[in-house]
Image (cartoon, helix red, strand yellow):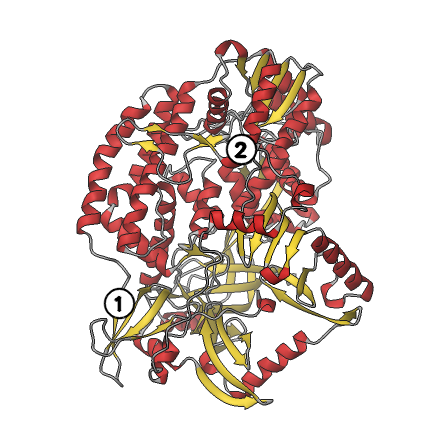
Amino acid sequence: MSKNLVIVESPAKAKTIQKYLGNDFEVKSSFGHIRDLPKKGMGIDLETFSPDYEVSADKKKLVTELKASVKKADMVWLASDEDREGEAIAWHLAEELKLKPDNRKRIVFHEITKNAILKAIENPRDIDQNLVNAQQARRVLDRIVGFEMSPVLWKKVKPGLSAGRVQSVAVRLVVEREKEIRAFTPKVSFKLDGIFLNKTSQEIAAKLKKDFEKEEEAEKFLELAKAVEFKVLNVETKPGSRSASAPFTTSTLQQEASSRLGYNVTNTMRLAQRLYEEGFITYMRTDSVNLSQEAIEGAKNQIISEYGAEYSSPRNYTTKSSSAQEAHEAIRPTDFSVKTISDVQLSKLYQLIYRRTLASQMANAKIEKTVIEIGNAKLPQHFEAQGEVIIFDGFLKAYGIVKAEDEDEENNEKLLPKVAVGEVLSYKKITAQEKYTRPSARYTEAGLVRKLEELGIGRPSTYAPTIQTIQNREYVDKREIEPQVREVVKISLTNDKIKKEVLEEKFGGDKNKFVPTDIGEVVNDFLTNNFSEILDFGFTARVEESFDEIASGAQKWKEMMTDFYSKFHPRIADVEENADRANGERLLGVDPKTGKNVHARIGRFGAMIQIGEQDDEEKPIFASLLAGQNIATINLEDALELFKLPFELNSFEDQTVSVGVGRFGPYVKWGETYISIPKGEDPLSIDQKRAEEIIAEKKLADAPIASYKGEPITKGTGRFGPFIKYKSIFINVPKKYNFENLSQSDINELVEAKLEKEANRYIQQWEAEKISIENARWGPIVKHGKNIYKIPKKKDDTKYEADELKDVSIDEVKKWITAQDPKAFAEKKKPAAKKAPAKKATTAAKKPAVKKPAAKK
């Protein structure tokens, strides 16, 4: 029997730590928080701000097991992470397991290595209540903000919406950037580039030092350039240096992983968590750039042994943010001799961390910058060519960037040929091109994290969940913005001849950047108009500072909450009582056919166009917006076009054909089959010929590619990637298979694996009743139709084992279902007789969202 019980948050962490401790220690996982505020109801006494914590249903068995382990142990070591969240987990464990100060010890470490674990055991402490209170303050304040603001949104905007202290500010950043882009008026200028040749015909690319506002000015310059002799007017060479960036914090890791690896914030944190739990890196939630002396020494030894002493330059970095407090060391490798690991995804992120840390301890790169001025006294402006050469690569060596003479493409540097002052150059080509200024770029995930950190909003642990939340709530998305096209003038001087041409240039397109949705904009405008204090960037940052003060013991958390709530709640009451409803409504103009007003607004099912008023004798008609359209920007002409959908075409192969738009986007309907119109294609442009082409493509895609036991196999690509279909079963095709060239053996393997999985899925099945007991991810469940129900405990308060469920009767299962849903087996009333259909335009506009066939899932 182990005398010592160690409790950590995750099983992976427990497994790693168990290896380092002897038989006197048993390591168990709490699987994160064992208790929290209740899921239903606020769970906070608003008089005292005391939280009413409860153990969630899925943790009760675990808590029982931990209590049993505690009884057997002489000492319990609480080893959760060393940030505020980890401190709170330790406190909740101590409270729920009734641990007294004399039978508990709190240990912390920022890396899961044998030395760090043993050192932590030698230096235990008690739970830091100030850190716990800082986390409680954050949890309670955010719960109050969400629970009190969200119902206001339900009443004033649309049911089912939510608000949050940090998430709403993040949405505000995205919305304001989009409005800035819409309001942007580009300025036009002509930029001149020249390619010159020296006496050995080596090219020198240079730019004119001044842009011209007008086409005539640019053309006049080129006329002058025809008649002059270009010379090297000046050559300036000066030494320079580049220094490495500081080691990673949480936000800089998220930004770098996004730009270099294409990982989103959530994926980066998931992989970093695994690297930490498996002992490869230090704690991954930190806003500190500090390195321990042990790490500096480890990096120094690795640099000297791998690159030489001249590459070593040990240094420590200071965190600029005064509020930095999480984990107290940067993200770094725990062992510099480990350069790579077996898992490909993990290894990519690990190597990013490894190189960044090593580079931070290396010498500066020495460079030589060269600037060549080219021109003639007769010209009003001169050209300038810039280049640089790496003299000593220093820290760049860690990134695989070598000296310039090796012509490594990663240098991104431009080498200039040797020239002398006064040397005559000939021009190969001089080009003046019309250029438009661009608005600020939309936010990427990494860019949004950078902005939140810059404003002091949130902390390392909040960035990923915040960004995930605003997407899950559908306030922002990453839809593709189709580019627009404009004409630009290009004037070229070649062989003493001037040529003018008009080119087409795409602009305004975007991919993988945050764009606010219609509902996101409406919610943001409502909140900023009515809760300007809460949505204020400064207020949100000041709240974070208050949490820091609570963590340091300089402020009492309930006093902070009292002060906040005394101002916040009256504002909630005032807005709920007096604020107008918000639906983003815009009057677009008048419908020329009916003379009625045309509005764009948010409706029950999302963004829509409305012709007519709610109180008109004849009810208004509606049409949904297409993807890429926005209630804030759509014009009258485009809005009226939407009422042409759906429209009928001629029958094809004895089946009716129509074009419409539904919940999943525009479609061609052929008989009872809905076929998605390709992305970016305007449904209003679909004619008979194009519709038949789309139907033919669908028929080809659905044609059997093989068979299995006499049944056809078809394939397609759906919401979750490529799949094959056997009978009514959809089977995902993993990347290890060549989807474009599946062999019969591949198909047999995929089908048989799926059938075996399906066979193990059902514990019992009553097909006629549409009821089954199935194995699910978190244990057995009951299904009735599409609804899922929990399996209750037995009379002795224990859970059913799978073998016991095989003997449960259908009558018993029905009782379980009825207990959770009394109306589950109630007979459905026959629908009332429908009224005569209205005229076609109205019917079309009110057509409900169409669910596509499973193949388009």
Residue 231: percent from left, percent from top? 52, 60
Secondary structure under tag 1 reads strand
Viewer-side residue, 811 vs 559: 811
Position of residue 39 relative to residue 688, above or below, is above
Quarter holding the N terminus is top right
Residue located at (59% from left, 81% from top): 695
Identify the image quadrant of residue 598.
bottom left
Quarter holding the C terminus is bottom right
Residue farthest to the top? 102
Q: Which residue is mark 2?
A: 59
Callout 2 amino acid: Lys
Residue 311: percent from left, percent from top? 65, 30
Q: How many marks?
A: 2
Q: Is residue 106 left or right of residue 684?
A: right
Q: Earlier in the sequence, mark 1 or mark 2?
A: 2
Count neighbours of disc 2 (C-alpha within 10 A) and say few if under 14, some if 14 to 19, many if 20 or more.
some
Residue located at (68% from left, 47% from top): 405
Q: Which residue is mark 1?
A: 586
Residue 855: percent from left, percent from top? 61, 68
Q: Nearer the viewer, mark 1 or mark 2?
A: 2
Viewer-side residue, 668 vs 187: 668
Residue 570, visible in the rendered structure? yes
Callout 1 amino acid: Arg
Residue 62: percent from left, percent from top? 57, 29
Give me the C-alpha separation between circle 1 and circle 2. Answer: 49 Å
Identify the image quadrant of residue 521.
bottom left
Viewer-side residue, 787 vs 695: 787
Residue 441, visible in the rendered structure? no
Secondary structure under tag 2 reads helix
